[in-house]
C-alpha cells in the first residue's frame, strides 16, 4: 500500500460550546461556511493534507463537542493529540474566561509536550466584541502560547492558524529527532532518500501456538547502526509515548 | 246504194251537231268510202241548204211587225230625254254655287282641330318631365345633405320609374349617365365612413371589452349571492358606493338576469353607447342597395379579420404585468362584442359561421399566445391573476354565446404551470427551512410554548404529556414549519381552482394531486439534497430520520385538512390519497444510507492513515494507533447514537435499529477494508510480524464488536463481521495448513470462511516477504533449516491452494458423461501428489493412455466371471465368520471399523491369498490403514508429516508383500491359481508382459486400497440403510426364502425342512462353532466344505430385489462422492469454457441427488425404483457409483457380489439395532462414512433364544 503522506499530525479543537470550532474546521477542511448553529454531538474529525517544507502532512483534526455533557467522550482524545487549538468567541466574555479551565484540562489529560494555540474566533463581528485583542494576546503570553484572532465566516487567519500549529509541531519533532539520532544520518540525507527506511527492532517472540496467544517480550530497541527517517522517528516517539502512558 | 244514203244523213247530222274542227275527219270518211260518194254527198248537202233557207224566210216573216212597233216607240221617248237633260244641268249648277262656302268653313275647322291636339300633347310631355327633374334636384339635394341612402332610393326611383318614361330626352340621357357616377361617389363616401367606423371600433373595442368584462364580472358576483338568497333586495343598497350610471346599469343587468331576459340587448346597448354603428348600417344599406352587398360583406369581413389578427397579436412584454394581459383580453372581448352586435343587428353582414370561424381562429391564437406567455411566468401570483382574467374573459364571451371550453382546458394547463411555479417557490421555501434548522429537538419551556408548537403541528404523544416542563419535543423546528408550508401550498393551490366551474370532487382530486407532487417531488428532492449536504453530520441525519417520521404521521392530518377545504368526506372519496408516506420513507432510507456512507467514509479516512510496516519482523504487541483511534471514534459515535435525547418513546427503538444496522455496516466495512488492505495487489510482501500486528488490530476490532457498542445485538452477531479475517489470520498464525487443506469444503471446517484464493494471495505475499528477508539475512539463513523447511512447505501449500482455486465442480448426467467419456482426450485423471508417491508409479490409477489400457486389460482377469465364481464361496465364508463374531460380541460394534476389518480380510485373504496369523493380520491392517489415511496428505516428505508416515507404511507393506509373493511364487507351481495375484501374474504372462516384483507389490497394494475402504464404506451404508428401513430387510428375507437361500446355513443339504427345525439346526451348528471360532479362523483359507458351495453367481443374479437394494444403497450413499480430473485441453462444458490445466471435480453424489430420474417417487431410499424396467436405460450417467468410462471401477462386480453376500448373510442370520440414541451423521470426504465411527450397533443372532436353549 503506497503511503500518501510523510507525517500524520493529530490536532484537537477545544473550547466552549458555540465558539465556532466546527465552523473553523469546516472552513479549513471544506473552505465553506454554514450560518446555522448545529451543536456538535460527541466527536468528529476531518482530515486535510497540507504541504510544509516539501513534506506531505496529513492533519487529522478532531472536533470536540463543547457541551459539558460530552466531556467524558472528548477528554479521551486529548492524549493522542499532538496539537490543541483553544478556541474562544470574541463576542462572548465567558468563553474567553473559560480558556483557563480548558488549559487546565489540557494539562490534566494531554501529553505534556503538546503544542497549543489560542484562537479568538468570530473576529468579523467587531461590533459585538466583548474581548479585546490585547486581552487575548496577554492571556496567550501569560501561558506562552501563540495567539490569533480568526473568523471562520470571513475566512480570516484560519489557514494561518492551522499551518502555524502544524509548523510548531514539525519544528518540535525535528528538534527531538535530532536529539535522538545524534549519531550518523542527519535529516538532510534522509530528505533526499525518500525510500522507506525500515525500523528493525530485534524482538524476541515466544509463541504459544496451541492457544494462539502471542506474548511479546519487548527488548530495548537497538538504534545504533540503523538509520531513521523522520517518519520512523516520529512513529518511534509516538510508540514510546504510548508505552509510557 | 241503198246503204250510202243513211250514211250521208248521219254524217250531216254529225257535221251540224259537232264543232267545225271535227268536220275534217268526218268529211274524210265521206271521201274515203266511194269514188262517187262525193257527188252524192254534195247533192245531199245542197238539199240540206235549201231546207235551211226556207226555214229562215219563214221566221223573218213572222217577227217583222214586232220590229216596226218597237221603232215607233223609241222615237217618242227621245223627246222626253232631251227635256230631262236640261233640267239636270241646271240643278247641277245651282248646287255648285251653294257648296263653295261650306268647303271654306270646313277647312277652317280642320286647322283649329290640329292646333288643339298639339297643345294637349305638349302639356302631357311636360307633365312627365317635371317629376324627373324634381327627383333629380332632390337627389342632388340629398347628396348635398349626405342622405345617401335616400339619394340612392331616389336614384332607384328615377331609374326605374321616371327615367324610362322620358328617356328620349337629352337631359335624361345625361342623367342616366350621371347616376352611376353618383353611386360610385356614394360608395366611396360611405366606405370612408366605414373606415372611420372601423377605426373607431378598433379604438374603442378596448373599452367595450373592458366594460363587457366588467359587466360579466359584476353579473357574476351579483348572481352568486343571488343564487343563494333569491329574494334579497338587491340593487341600490348593494351598489351604494358606485357611480350612478353603473348602479342603474347594474340594476338593469340584475333585473334582466333575474327575469331571465336576453342579456344581449343590454350589452349591445353598451356597445352602441360607445361606438356609433350607423356608418356600418349605412354602408351596409348603401351597398346592399347598390347590389354590392357581397363586396361590402367581403370587404368588411376582410377588414375585421385583419383587425382580429392585429388584436390577437400580443405585445411582447405582455407577460410582465397583469395590465398587459388585461388590455389584450379587453381588446379581444371588444372585438367580439362588436361582431356579435353586428351579427345581431345587421342582416347577413356577418353570419354565425363567420363569427364562429373567427372565434375559433382567435381561440387557437389566444391559447397559443397564453401558452407561450404563461410559460415565462414564474410568479405564482401573476399566474393566479392571469387565471382570473381568463376566467372573466371566458365568462364574458360565453355570455355572448361563444364556446369557451378550450379556454378552460387551457386553464387546466395553466393550472399545472401554476402548480409548477408553486412547487418551485416552495422548493425554495423548504430549502430555506432546512437551511435554518439546527437539527436539535424543539425545547419547550412551559405549557404555552408547547401549545404554540402544537397549534402549528399535530403532535400527540401521551408519554410526552406526562413529562414535566421544560421538555423537548422529538422533532426539530423544521417539522412544524414544513407542515405549515405544506398547508400554505394547499391554500395557494386551491386559489387557482376557485371560479373554475369545477366540482368540489375535482378540486379535491386536484388538490391531492398537487399536494402529492409537492410531497413526492419538491419536498422529497429537498430532503434528498439536504441529506447529501456536507455539513449534515450523523446526529443531524438521525434527527432527520426522526423528523420524517413525524411528518409522515402528520400526513393524515393533511388529508383531513384537504377534506375540510373541499367538503369532501374521505369516506366517500377514494380518489387520490396522499402518498407522502413514501417520500418520508424514502428520505428516511436515504438518511439511513447516508449514515452508513458517512460512517464508512470516516472509516476509509482512518484506513487511509493506516501505516503498517509490512516488513516488520515482529509486532510490538500493541494495536496500531490509527485503529485505536478508529475504534474509539466508532465507540463514541455509537454511544452518542444510542443516547440521543428522546429515548423515551418508539423513536429510540427506531434509531436504535438504525444504530444497529449502522454498527453492523461499519463493522463489515471495516472488515472488508482491512481485508482489502491485506490483499491489495500493490502490497507485494508481508512479513509474519506484520501479520501479527494485523492480527492484534483485528483482535481490537473483535473486542469492539463484542463489547456491544450498540445494544440489541444477539450473541456474537457483530463479531461475525470479522469472521473471515479471523479465520484467515488464525490459519496464518497457527500455520494450520494441513487442517485447512484436509477439511477444505467441509461444513465443519475450522477455516470454512477462508477462500483458497484469499489464502493463496496472502500466502504468496508472506512467502515473498520471507524470501526477501532471508535473502537479506542470508548469512544466517543458510544455517536455518527451519526456514527452508517452512519455505518448502509454503511452496507446497501454494500449489495445493492453486489446485483448489481452479476447480470446476461438475454435476448432472450429461456433463459427467462428457467428463468420464473424455478420459485420455479431454481430461486426465488426477490424483494428489501424495497418492502417487505412496502408491507408486506402476498403479492402474496412476497410469494414463496406452499404459493404462494395457494394465487394465491385465487386471481385468482378476475380476473375470470365472475368477469371481472362484472367490465367491470363500468370500461368503469370511463374511459369515466375521458376522458371527459381531453377533457374539456382547457390546456394541463400531460398524465402519468392523467393516474395514471385514473388507481388509477379504482383500488380504482372497485377493492376495495371504495366510496370516490373526496378530499378523491386525498389524498389517493397521499399517495399511495408516497408508490409506495419508494418501491424501500434504506432499511434504519431512519428519512427522503425513506423507512421511504414508511412505513408511508403504515400505512396511512392500516388505511384507515381497515375502508373501516370493512364497507364493515358490508354491505356485503346485497350486491352481485362485487368488488375484495369481490371476495377475498369469494374465501378464499371457499378455506377453512379465510383472516385476515392484509392479506386483504396487498392484497388490493398489488392489487392497481400491477394495478396502470403498467396500467397507458401502457395507456400512448397507447396514445403516437396512436398519433404517426394516421393510426392505423383510422383503429381502422373503426373496431369499422364495429362492430357498434362506436355509442356506442348514447343516443338512438334504432337502427342505420345517422352518423351526432349520433354524434349530442352524443354531445348533452355530453354538458348536462358536467355542471353536478361533480355531476355525485359522484354517479359513482351507478349501471350503461342500455344504457351503450353495451360492454362485447365477444364484446371486436371480435375487433381483437384492440387486435393487444394493443399487439403491450405492445411489443414496455412493462411497466415493466424486473424482478429480485435469483438463488436457480447453473445452466447453454446458456453455462454460474450462481452461486447460484446470481441475474438474465431478460429483457423483450431487448427480445422484439431483437427477430428475430419481426425483420420483421420492428422492429418499427406495430400492423399488430400480425394479421398474428400463430405469437404467434412461441414461447411465445418472447412476455412477462406480464412475464410468475408461476409468470406471474395475472391481465393480466383485464389490457388488461382496455386498450381496453380506446382505444375505446379515438378513438370514442376524438382527441389529442402534446402540446410540440417534443415527450418526455421515461424512463424505474422502469417502462416505459415519463421523467419528459413530455407527454403533448391537448385533444379535436370529432366534437367539433357541440358540441359548440348545
Image (spheres, coloured by chain):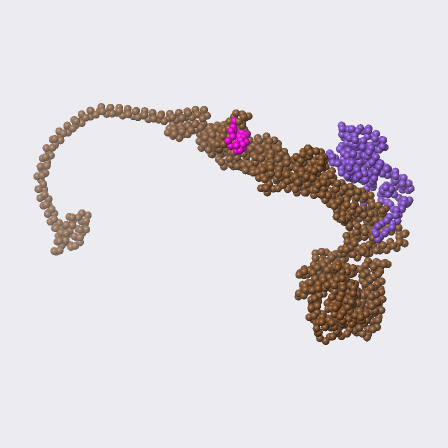
Task: Please provide percent x and percent y for residue B138.
Answer: 42, 25
Toward the front, the furthest residue is B1253
Quadrant where the N terminus of chain B sits is bottom left
- Relative depth, front residue between B725 and A3: B725
Q: Is residue B606 magenta?
A: no
In screen coordinates, is A127 left or right of B95? right
Residue at image point 80% right, 48% down: B678
Residue at image point 76% right, 56% down: B746
* Colour applied to chain A: purple
Instruction: Answer with the quarter of the image where residue B905 lies.
Output: bottom right
- Relative depth, front residue between B757 and B621: B621
In screen coordinates, is B869 left or right of B4? right
* Colour applied to chain B: brown
Instruction: Answer with the quarter of the image where residue B485 lies.
Output: top right
Q: What's the magenta region? A: B208-236
* Numbered-mark total: 0
Instruction: Answer with the quarter of the image where residue A183 lies.
Output: top right
Task: Answer yes or no: is residue B162 visible.
Answer: yes
Amino acid at each position: 500500500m503506497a503511503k500518501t503522506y510523510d507525517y500524520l499530525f493529530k490536532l484537537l479543537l477545544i473550547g466552549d460550546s458555540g465558539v465556532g470550532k466546527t465552523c473553523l474546521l469546516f472552513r479549513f477542511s471544506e473552505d465553506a461556511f454554514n450560518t446555522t448553529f448545529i451543536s456538535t454531538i460527541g466527536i468528529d474529525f476531518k482530515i486535510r493534507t497540507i504541504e510544509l517544507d516539501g513534506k506531505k502532512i496529513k492533519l487529522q483534526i478532531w472536533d470536540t463537542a463543547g457541551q459539558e455533557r460530552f466531556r467524558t467522550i472528548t477528554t479521551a482524545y486529548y492524549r493522542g493529540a499532538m496539537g490543541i487549538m483553544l478556541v474562544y468567541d470574541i463576542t462572548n466574555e465567558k468563553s474567553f474566561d473559560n480558556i483557563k479551565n480548558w488549559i487546565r484540562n489540557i494539562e490534566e489529560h494531554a501529553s505534556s509536550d503538546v503544542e497549543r494555540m489560542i484562537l479568538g474566533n468570530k473576529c468579523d463581528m467587531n461590533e459585538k466584541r466583548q474581548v479585546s485583542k490585547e486581552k487575548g494576546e496577554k492571556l496567550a503570553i501569560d501561558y506562552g502560547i501563540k495567539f490569533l484572532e480568526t473568523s471562520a465566516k470571513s475566512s480570516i487567519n484560519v489557514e494561518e492558524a492551522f499551518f502555524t500549529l502544524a509548523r510548531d509541531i514539525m519544528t518540535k519533532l525535528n528538534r527531538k529527532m535530532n536529539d535522538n539520532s545524534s549519531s550518523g544520518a542527519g535529516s538532510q540525507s534522509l530528505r533526499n532518500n525518500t525510500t522507506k527506511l525500515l525500523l528493525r527492532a530485534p524482538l524476541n517472540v515466544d509463541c504459544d501456538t496451541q492457544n494462539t496467544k502471542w506474548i511479546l517480550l519487548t527488548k530495548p530497541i537497538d538504534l545504533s547502526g540503523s538509520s531513521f527517517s523522520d517518519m520512523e522517528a516520529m512513529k518511534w516517539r509516538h510508540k514510546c509515548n504510548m508505552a509510557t502512558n | 246504194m241503198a246503204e250510202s244514203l243513211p250514211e250521208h244523213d248521219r254524217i250531216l247530222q254529225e257535221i251540224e251537231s259537232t264543232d267545225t274542227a271535227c268536220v275534217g275527219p268526218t268529211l274524210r270518211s265521206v271521201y274515203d268510202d266511194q269514188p262517187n260518194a262525193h257527188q252524192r254527198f254534195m247533192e245531199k248537202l245542197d238539199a240540206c241548204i235549201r231546207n235551211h233557207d226556207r226555214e229562215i224566210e219563214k221566221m223573218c216573216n213572222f217577227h217583222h211587225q214586232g220590229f216596226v212597233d218597237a221603232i215607233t216607240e223609241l222615237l217618242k221617248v227621245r223627246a222626253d230625254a232631251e227635256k230631262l237633260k236640261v233640267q239636270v244641268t241646271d240643278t247641277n249648277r245651282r248646287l255648285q254655287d251653294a257648296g263653295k262656302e261650306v268647303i271654306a268653313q270646313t277647312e277652317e275647322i280642320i286647322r283649329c282641330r290640329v292646333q288643339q291636339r298639339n297643345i294637349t300633347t305638349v302639356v302631357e310631355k311636360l307633365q312627365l318631365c317635371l317629376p324627373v327633374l324634381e327627383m333629380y334636384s332632390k337627389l342632388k339635394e340629398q347628396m348635398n345633405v349626405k342622405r345617401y341612402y335616400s339619394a340612392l332610393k331616389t336614384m332607384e326611383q328615377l331609374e326605374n320609374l321616371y327615367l324610362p318614361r322620358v328617356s328620349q330626352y337629352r337631359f335624361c340621357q345625361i342623367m342616366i349617365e350621371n347616376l352611376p357616377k353618383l353611386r360610385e361617389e356614394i360608395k366611396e363616401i360611405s366606405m370612408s365612413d366605414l373606415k372611420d367606423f372601423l377605426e373607431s371600433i378598433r379604438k374603442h373595442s378596448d373599452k367595450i371589452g373592458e366594460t363587457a368584462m366588467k359587466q360579466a364580472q359584476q353579473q357574476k358576483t351579483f348572481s352568486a349571492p343571488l343564487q343563494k338568497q333569491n329574494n334579497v333586495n338587491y340593487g341600490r343598497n348593494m351598489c351604494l358606493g358606485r357611480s350612478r350610471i353603473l348602479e342603474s346599469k347594474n340594476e338593469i343587468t340584475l333585473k334582466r338576469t333575474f327575469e331571465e331576459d336576453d342579456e344581449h340587448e343590454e350589452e349591445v346597448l353598451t356597445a352602441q353607447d360607445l361606438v356609433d354603428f350607423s356608418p356600418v348600417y349605412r354602408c351596409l344599406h348603401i351597398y346592399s342597395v347598390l347590389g354590392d352587398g357581397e363586396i361590402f360583406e367581403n370587404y368588411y369581413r376582410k377588414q375585421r379579420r385583419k383587425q382580429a389578427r392585429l388584436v390577437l397579436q400580443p405585445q411582447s412584454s405582455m407577460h410582465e404585468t397583469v395590465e398587459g394581459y388585461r388590455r389584450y383580453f379587453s381588446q379581444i372581448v371588444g372585438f367580439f362584442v362588436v361582431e356579435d352586435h353586428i351579427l345581431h343587428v345587421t342582416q347577413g353582414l356577418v353570419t354565425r359561421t363567420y363569427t364562429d370561424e373567427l372565434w375559433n381562429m382567435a381561440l387557437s391564437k389566444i391559447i397559443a399566445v397564453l401558452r407561450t406567455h404563461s410559460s415565462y411566468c414564474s410568479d405564482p401570483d401573476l399566474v393566479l391573476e392571469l387565471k382570473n382574467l381568463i376566467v372573466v374573459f371566458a365568462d364574458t364571451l360565453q355570455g355572448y354565446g361563444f364556446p369557451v371550453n378550450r379556454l378552460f382546458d387551457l386553464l387546466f394547463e395553466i393550472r399545472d404551470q401554476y402548480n409548477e411555479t408553486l412547487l418551485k417557490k416552495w422548493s425554495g421555501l423548504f430549502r430555506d427551512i432546512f437551511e435554518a434548522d439546527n437539527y436539535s429537538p424543539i425545547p419547550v419551556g412551559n405549557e404555552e410554548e408547547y401549545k404554540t408548537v402544537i397549534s402549528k403541528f399535530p403532535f400527540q404523544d401521551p408519554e410526552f404529556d406526562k413529562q414535566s416542563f421544560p421538555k423537548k419535543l422529538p422533532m426539530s423546528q423544521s417539522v412544524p414549519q414544513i407542515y405549515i408550508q405544506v398547508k400554505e401550498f394547499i391554500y395557494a393551490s386551491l386559489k387557482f381552482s376557485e371560479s373554475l366551474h369545477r366540482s368540489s370532487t375535482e378540486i379535491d382530486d386536484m388538490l391531492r394531486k398537487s399536494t402529492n407532487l409537492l410531497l413526492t417531488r419538491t419536498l422529497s428532492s429537498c430532503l434528498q439534497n439536504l441529506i447529501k449536504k456536507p455539513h449534515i453530520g450523523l446526529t443531524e441525519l438521525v434527527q432527520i430520520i426522526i423528523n420524517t417520521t413525524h411528518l409522515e404521521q402528520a400526513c393524515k392530518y393533511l388529508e383531513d385538512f384537504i377534506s375540510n377545504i373541499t367538503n369532501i368526506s374521505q369516506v366517500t372519496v377514494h380518489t387520490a390519497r396522499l402518498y407522502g408516506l413514501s417520500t418520508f420513507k424514502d428520505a428516511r432510507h436515504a438518511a439511513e444510507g447516508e449514515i452508513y456512507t458517512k460512517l464508512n467514509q470516516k472509516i476509509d479516512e482512518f484506513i487511509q492513515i493506516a501505516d503498517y510496516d509490512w516488513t516488520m519482523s515482529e509486532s510490538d504487541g500493541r494495536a496500531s494507533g490509527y485503529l485505536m483511534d478508529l475504534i474509539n471514534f466508532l465507540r463514541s459515535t455509537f454511544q452518542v447514537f444510542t443516547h440521543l435525547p428522546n429515548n423515551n418513546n418508539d423513536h429510540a427503538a427506531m434509531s436504535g435499529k438504525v444504530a444497529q444496522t449502522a454498527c453492523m455496516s461499519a463493522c463489515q466495512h471495516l472488515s472488508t477494508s482491512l481485508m482489502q488492505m491485506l490483499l491489495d495487489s500493490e502490497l507485494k510482501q508481508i512479513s509474519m510480524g506484520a501479520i501479527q500486528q494485523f492480527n492484534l488490530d483485528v483482535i481490537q476490532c473483535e473486542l469492539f464488536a463484542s463489547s456491544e457498542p450498540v445494544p440489541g445485538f444477539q450473541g456474537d452477531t457483530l463479531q461475525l463481521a470479522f469472521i473471515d479475517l479471523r479465520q484467515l489470520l488464525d490459519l496464518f498464525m497457527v500455520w494450520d495448513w494441513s487442517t485447512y487443506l484436509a477439511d477444505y469444503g467441509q461444513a465443519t471446517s475450522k477455516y470454512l470462511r477462508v477462500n483458497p484464493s484469499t489464502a493463496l494471495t496472502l500466502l504468496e505475499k508472506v512467502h515473498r516477504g520471507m524470501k526477501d528477508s532471508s535473502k537479506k539475512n542470508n548469512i544466517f539463513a543458510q544455517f536455518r533449516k527451519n526456514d527452508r523447511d517452512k519455505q518448502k512447505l509454503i511452496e507446497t501449500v501454494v500449489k495445493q491452494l492453486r489446485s483448489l482455486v481452479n476447480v470446476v465442480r461438475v454435476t448432472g448426467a450429461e456433463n459427467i458423461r462428457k467428463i468420464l467419456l473424455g478420459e485420455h482426450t479431454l481430461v486426465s485423471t488426477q490424483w494428489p501428489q501424495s497418492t502417487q508417491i505412496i502408491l507408486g508409479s506402476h498403479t492402474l490409477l496412476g497410469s494414463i493412455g496406452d499404459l493404462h489400457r494395457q494394465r487394465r486389460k491385465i487386471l481385468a482377469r482378476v475380476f473375470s466371471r470365472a475368477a469371481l465364481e472362484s472367490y465367491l464361496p470363500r468370500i461368503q465364508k469370511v463374511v459369515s465368520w466375521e458376522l458371527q463374531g459381531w453377533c457374539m460380541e456382547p457390546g456394541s460394534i463400531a460398524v465402519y471399523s468392523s467393516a474395514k476389518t471385514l473388507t481388509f480380510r477379504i482383500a488380504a485373504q482372497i485377493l492376495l491369498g495371504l495366510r496370516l496369523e490373526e496378530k499378523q493380520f491386525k498389524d498389517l491392517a493397521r499399517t495399511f490403514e495408516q497408508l490409506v489415511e495419508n494418501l491424501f496428505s500434504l506432499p511434504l516428505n519431512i519428519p512427522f508429516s503425513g506423507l512421511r508416515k504414508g511412505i513408511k507404511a508403504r515400505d512396511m507393506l512392500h516388505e511384507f508383500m515381497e515375502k508373501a509373493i516370493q512364497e507364493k511364487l515358490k508354491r505356485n507351481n503346485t497350486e491352481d491359481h485362485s487368488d488375484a495375484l495369481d490371476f495377475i501374474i498369469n494374465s501378464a504372462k499371457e499378455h506377453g508382459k512379465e510383472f516385476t516384483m515392484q509392479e506386483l507389490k504396487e498392484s497388490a497394494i493398489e488392489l487392497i486400497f481400491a477394495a478396502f475402504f470403498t467396500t467397507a464404506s458401502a457395507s456400512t451404508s448397507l447396514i445403516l440403510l437396512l436398519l433404517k428401513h426394516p421393510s426392505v430387510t423383510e422383503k429381502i428375507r422373503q426373496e431369499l426364502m422364495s429362492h430357498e437361500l434362506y436355509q442356506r446355513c442348514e447343516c443338512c443339504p438334504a432337502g427342505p425342512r420345517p422352518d423351526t427345525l432349520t433354524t434349530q439346526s442352524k443354531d445348533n451348528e452355530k453354538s458348536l462353532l462358536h467355542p471353536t471360532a478361533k480355531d476355525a479362523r485359522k484354517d479359513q483359507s482351507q478349501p471350503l466344505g461342500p455344504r457351503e458351495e450353495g451360492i454362485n453367481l447365477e444364484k446371486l443374479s436371480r435375487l433381483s430385489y437384492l440387486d435393487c437394494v444394493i443399487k439403491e444403497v450405492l445411489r443414496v450413499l455412493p462411497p466415493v462422492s466424486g473424482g478429480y480430473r485435469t483438463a488436457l485441453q480447453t473445452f466447453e462444458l454446458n456453455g462454460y469454457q474450462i481452461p486447460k490445466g484446470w481441475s474438474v471435480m465431478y460429483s457423483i453424489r450431487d448427480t445422484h441427488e439431483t437427477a430428475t430420474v430419481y426425483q420420483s417417487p421420492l428422492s429418499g431410499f427406495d430400492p423399488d425404483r430400480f425394479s421398474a424396467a428400463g430405469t437404467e436405460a434412461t441414461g447411465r450417467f445418472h447412476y455412477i457409483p462406480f464412475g464410468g468410462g475408461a476409468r470406471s471401477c474395475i472391481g465393480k462386480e466383485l464389490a457388488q457380489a461382496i455386498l450381496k453376500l453380506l446382505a444375505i448373510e446379515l438378513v438370514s442370520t442376524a438382527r441389529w439395532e442402534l446402540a446410540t440414541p440417534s443415527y450418526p451423521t455421515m461424512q463424505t470426504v474422502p469417502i462416505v462414512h459415519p463421523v467419528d465411527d459413530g455407527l454403533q450397533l448391537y448385533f444379535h443372532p436370529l432366534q437367539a433364544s433357541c440358540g441359548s436353549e440348545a
